[in-house]
Amino acid sequence: MPNGKLIVFEGAEGAGKSTQVRLLAERLTAAHISYVSLREPGGTPAGDAIREILLHREHEITDAAEALLFMASRAELIAGQILPSLSAGKVVLLDRFFLSTYAYQIFGRRLPEPEIRAANRLATAGLVPDLTLLLDVPATEGLGRADARGARDRMERSGDDFHQRVTSAFRQFADKKWQDSHPECGPIKLIDGTGDETTVQKRVISALVTAFPQPFGSLKS
């Protein structure tokens, strides 16, 4: 690969993103495909500090500050980790990217879309994902999974109506008309996130192999 691939995993709370990133990383390791696994917010010293502010249960911040903190972490991650990894020909697995900003801050917090998209353009410097895998589970099921992990973080405590809006937003993102009007998001593939993790992993691998026979063809079992 002269250039790497940016593969983003998205979805509402408890959709199984982190699990699927981990399982895919294991498959890439076994196939000797060079990769780096990252998450938002975080991945850099500044990003890790921002993550603590955004997710700590005791912090209360304004919706605008929340959105801008996500953007700041993203700008650092892209410059410090993602672009160098892509230039080195690596696959970048990213747990959340700016679809989450659109879902949580535009639809969930109801912040104005033009301003959020403009800030995101500044943060991303025009970087477009090669593929976003959008894991879909019902909002109640996702929150149940999140609760099973332990106490909810600040974002998870935002209320059922908020999370219903977020889940509905993610499903809207799978629509071709929405994608055509948001070219900065790149191709988005909706993945059924229900069922056991192995079943969902097979759906993820199938989507990757279909989209990019190179370098992911060797992952097909």
Image (cartoon, rainbow, N blue to C red):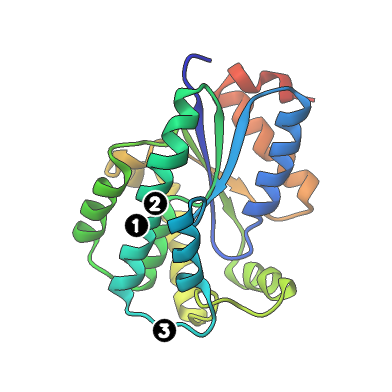
> Residue 74: which disc?
2
Task: State the residue in front, 45 or 79.
Answer: 45
| Looking at the image, residue 155 lies above or below residue 197 | below
The residue at the point 34 percent across, 57 percent down is 72
The residue at the point 31 percent across, 64 percent down is 68
Q: Mark 1 touching mark 2, by CB under 8 A?
A: yes
| Looking at the image, residue 59 lies above or below residue 123 | below
Could you give the CA–CA distance between mark 3 and mark 1, rounded to whole angstroms? 18 Å
Q: Residues within 10 Å of mark 2 (few under 14, many from 20)?
A: many
Q: Which amino acid, mark 2?
A: Arg
The residue at the point 44 percent across, 24 percent down is 87
* SS category of the residue bearing label 3: loop
The residue that disc 3 covers is 60
Task: State the residue in front, 69 or 142.
Answer: 69
Q: Which amino acid, mark 3?
A: Glu
Q: Is residue 178 visible?
A: yes
> Residue 145: which disc?
none
**Location of residue 21 by image quarter:** top right
Q: Residues within 10 Å of mark 1 (few under 14, many from 20)?
A: some
The residue that disc 1 covers is 72
